[in-house]
Structure formats: structure tokens, C-alpha cells
Image (tube, rainbow, N blue to C red):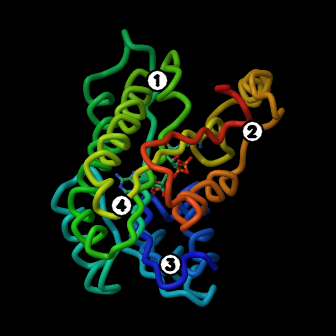
Amino acid sequence: MKLQNKVALVTGGGRGIGKAIADRLAREGANIIVCDIDQATAEAAAKEISAMGVKAIGLVCDVSKSADVEEMVKKAVEAFGTINILVNNAGITRDGLLLRMKEEEWDLVLNVNLKSAFLCTKFAIKHIMRAGYGRVINIASVVGLMGNAGQANYAASKGGLIAFTKTVAKEFAGKGVTSNAIAPGFIRTAMTDKLKDEDKAKLTQFIPLGSLGEAAHVADAVAFLASPDAAYVTGQVLAVDGGMTM
Ligand code: NAP
């Protein structure tokens, strides 16, 4: 129980990796704000987490929209008085080769995956600073380190998120706030369920640990970065990828 009485806000926390992160932080004793674009999903996740004995609320928000994020942070602070941990997890893909990629697909992915982190951090950071214990944790991707054919928009958004992470680390290092990124490899969620079985088998050949990861692997890394154990860790990118990028 390393996060008792801390308050964590997880974007895209209704399902997939975000839900696993919200559950894991709750198991450490944190109170949780589940933010999701779908109200019913956010509320159902919060209800489940409340049953673990912490306080949890679900808030609907499109993290790519400034007004939504401002309102969501306001409601979170009204409910819990503060925010300690911000996990910028919400993300989408709209894959396609560069020559066929539409401008709208580029804009949508950059807005949901990267602009969102700017907006959530901008509106939450003053509360995080005041709290005296602050963590910003951004869920990037190995693709942001390596690039990937067919994912120019997604790779650029995740590479940008890594640069953003380091900038936040530098700007807030003196204010009790650390900022780190996690670069998951291929993790079993709805996002990767879209891949054909033969493509998953091909990918597995490049994973030294020999299998796709689970959302819980990413959540465990987030729990470490959110905890006092990571007090002297900032501006880092932790790959949770079965060894893909070593
Ligand atoms: P997922 O299963 O598709 O879940 C994404 C969550 O984000 C969903 O709850 C979704 O809500 C929510 N969301 C989408 N757009 C949003 C918006 N505009 N505002 C607020 N919430 C929004 O994806 P995942 O696999 O868990 O991925 C989570 C994060 O990990 C993403 O940033 C992804 O890029 C990153 N990642 C995943 C993998 C992987 O292999 N799965 C690898 C590397 C990095 P709805 O379901 O209601 O649309």
C-alpha cells in the first residue's frame, strides 16, 4: 500500500491498459479518477474500483478537447481536493502507409495521443505541484522510439510524447514533480486484438521474452514510477516490451 491517500487520475482508464493501471494504483491504496470518452465505461470502471475499498469516480472527457479537460480536472479536484498522479494513457491508432494517410487521420491521432497530454498536464499541474507529491506518467510506445511502417501518425505522437515527458521533467523538477514515460511493446488489449494471428506470430519472433505482454505488466511499471520508490527517477523512458528494444 505505497499510495495510500494519494489521488490518481488515469485517462482512457475505462478499459485496456488504462483500466489495469487504475486497478493497480487502487491496490496500492490510491483514490482514483477514471477518465474516459464513454461515460458508462468510466462509471462502470469506477464502480468496480470502489469495491476495492478506495474512493473512485468516473468522469467523461474527450482528452483532445481543451474545454472537456478543464471541466474534468475541475470536477476531479472538487471531488478529491487534489491530484498527485496523472497518467496520460488515452490513445488511439489510425494506421496506414504514409502515401495513403489522410490529413484527418494524422490530426486525430496527434490530438488524442499528444495534444491530450499537453492539455491534461497543463490543467492538472498546478494542483499536482501544490500537493507536494507529484507524478506525471505518460504511456508512450516502443514505436515512438523505433518508428513503424504504417504508423507515421502514431509513431510521431508517441515520439512527441517522449520529448514532452522530458520537458515536463525539466520544468517541474524543482517543484516536487517527476515526469516519466513508459514505452510498452505489444500488449494484449483491444488495440492489438485487431492484428491477425499470423501477424501476432511474426511479431513474437522479435520479442526476446517470447510472448505479447499483458496490461498488468504495464500497470506494474506505472505503480513503481508512481511510488516513493521512484523518487529519484525523472525524465526517463521505461520500455515494457519483453526486450524488443534492447
Ligand atoms: P484501448 O484498449 O483501445 O483503450 C484505450 C482507452 O482510451 C479506451 O478506454 C478508450 O475509450 C479511451 N479513449 C480513446 N480516445 C479517447 C479520448 N479522446 N478521450 C478519452 N479517452 C479516450 O487501448 P490500450 O491498448 O489499452 O492502449 C492504452 C495506451 O497504451 C494507449 O496510449 C496506447 O497507444 C498505448 N500502447 C498500447 C500498446 C498495446 O500493445 N496495446 C502498445 C504500446 C502503447 P473507448 O473504449 O470508450 O473508446
Q: Secondary structure at mark 4?
A: strand
Q: Secondary structure at mark 2?
A: loop
Q: Residue furthest right?
A: 210
Residue 134 figure quarter = bottom left
- Of circles 2 and 4, which is in front? 4
Identify the residue position indicated by label 3 in the image: 46
- Mark nearer the N terminus (1 vs 3): 3
At a point 30% along the width and 49% down the height, the residue shown is 116
Three-letter amino acid code of the residue under disc 2: Leu
Identify the residue position indicated by label 4 in the image: 177
Front in this rendered view, residue 100 or 9: 9
Which quadrant: the N terminus?
bottom right
- Of circles 1 and 4, which is in front? 4
Q: Secondary structure at mark 3?
A: helix
Three-letter amino acid code of the residue under disc 4: Val
Residue 99 x/y as whole percent: 37, 9
User: Does the beta carbon of the residue at mark 4 sit less than 8 Å from ligand 1?
Assistant: no
Front in this rendered view, residue 101 or 21: 21
